[in-house]
Image (cartoon, helix red, strand yellow):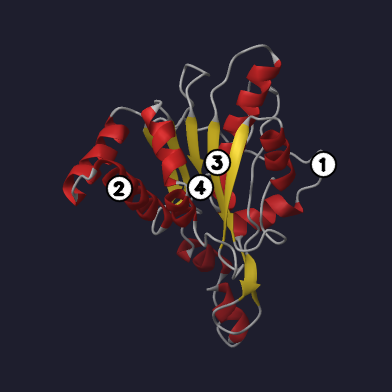
């Protein structure tokens, strides 16, 4: 509406009417990407800044909340609240349980928090299980979030990182579901060892593709049919061993 008023200055619209036409701003939800064990007084967010040419062809489109957060300065105050996810999205109670993380783009947020927790636990003498981490982005030099941390945790033996780059032509995996299939033996062994699977990111394309990749891994290692493989994935979810934190 504001764009229309700017485009057609002859329109006279009282401010009160303009405000009445505006709907309430929907809350924006971001996954916490830090561990309360490692730092109980700090919450880290991983936010992708939305900015690009407007679909109208006139000017630029900027994300409402991401731009607001991006303009904040150290010491500024903003208001939010912590929402407990339902269904739950939390690491298993036993730190020795193996983990499989799948989080392309800003979906890496929860992965970072879980791995930070595992690193803190090991530094404090707790035995932690292995983590298979599947991250994806367009190009490793452009939008691979927390790359340095991931490299450090891999070198420390906290995680084994598997990558997918959609804009790198000669990379073996374009999307995270491709990386899962490429590492099917590793993924299957982790699942046989009792691994929990955590998927964070796009709900429209990525999450269904990951479910199908896991079903394909089940078929290839057991000889099952499609229906049995899908029921197996559903059972993982029912048992709390397959958890999603996804957004449209």
Q: Residues within 10 Å of mark 4 (few under 14, many from 20)?
A: few
* Front disc: 2 or 1: 2
**In the image, 124: left or right of 82?**
right
| 83 vs 10: above or below | above
Q: Quadrant of the C terminus?
A: bottom left
Residue found at the very far right of the displayed protein: 74
Image check: 124 left or right of 184?
A: right
Q: Position of residue 21 (x, y in %)?
A: 46, 65
Foreground: disc 4 or disc 3: 3
Is the residue marked by circle 3 packed among few (<14), some (14-19), or many (20+) residues within 10 Å?
many
Please tell me the numbered disc located at residue 27: 4
How much space separates mark 2 and mark 1, taking CA atoms? 51 Å
Can the viewer see residue 86? no
Describe the element under mark 2 as helix, strand or loop. Answer: helix
- Tell me whether the residue at label 4 lies in contact with that at label 3, contact meaning CB atoms closer than 8 angstroms: no
Chain-order first, disc 3 or disc 1? 1
The crowd level at tag 1 (other Cα within 10 Å; few <14, some 14-19, many 20+) is few
- Point out the tag, 1 or 4, that comes first from the N-terminus: 4
Q: Residue at x 46, y 22 (%)?
A: 92
Instruction: From this view, report whether residue 6 is shown above or below residue 181.
Output: below
Tag 3–tag 1 contact (CB < 8 Å):
no
Q: CA distance from mark 4 to mark 3?
A: 29 Å
Marks 1 & 4, CB-CB < 8 Å contact: no
Q: Which residue is mark 1?
A: 74
Report which residue position mark 3 lands on.
133
* Residue in the image at 56% along x and 34% along y: 81
Which residue bears the numbered disc 2? 220
Residue drawn at the location 31% of the way across and 50% of the way down: 216
The quarter of the displayed image where residue 123 is located: top right
Say which label, 4 or 3, has the lower sequence index: 4
Looking at this view, is 197 or 14 the one in front? 197
Q: Residue at x 57, y 31 (%)?
A: 114
């Amino acid at each position: 509406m504001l764009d229309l008023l700017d485009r057609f200055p002859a329109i006279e619209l009282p401010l009160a009417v303009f405000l009445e036409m505006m709907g309430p701003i929907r809350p924006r939800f971001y996954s916490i990407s830090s561990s309360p064990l490692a730092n109980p007084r700090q919450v880290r967010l991983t936010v992708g800044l939305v900015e690009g040419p407007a679909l109208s062809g006139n000017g630029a489109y900027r994300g409402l909340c991401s731009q607001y957060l991006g303009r904040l300065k150290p010491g500024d105050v903003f208001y939010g609240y912590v929402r407990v996810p339902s269904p739950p999205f939390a690491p298993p109670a036993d730190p020795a349980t193996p983990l499989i993380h799948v989080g392309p783009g800003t979906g890496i947020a929860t992965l970072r928090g879980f791995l930070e927790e595992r690193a803190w636990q090991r530094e404090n003498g707790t035995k932690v299980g292995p983590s298979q981490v599947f991250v994806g982005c367009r190009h490793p030099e452009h939008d691979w979030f927390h790359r340095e941390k991931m490299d450090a945790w891999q070198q420390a033996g906290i995680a084994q990182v598997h990558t997918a780059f959609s804009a790198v032509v000669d990379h073996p995996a374009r999307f995270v579901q491709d990386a899962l299939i490429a590492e099917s033996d590793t993924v299957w062994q982790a699942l046989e060892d009792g691994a929990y699977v955590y998927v964070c990111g796009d709900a429209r394309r990525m999450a269904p593709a990951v479910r199908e990749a896991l079903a394909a891994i089940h078929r290839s290692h057991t000889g099952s049919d499609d229906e049995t493989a899908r029921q197996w994935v559903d059972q993982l979810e029912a048992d709390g061993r397959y958890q999603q934190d996804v957004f449209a």
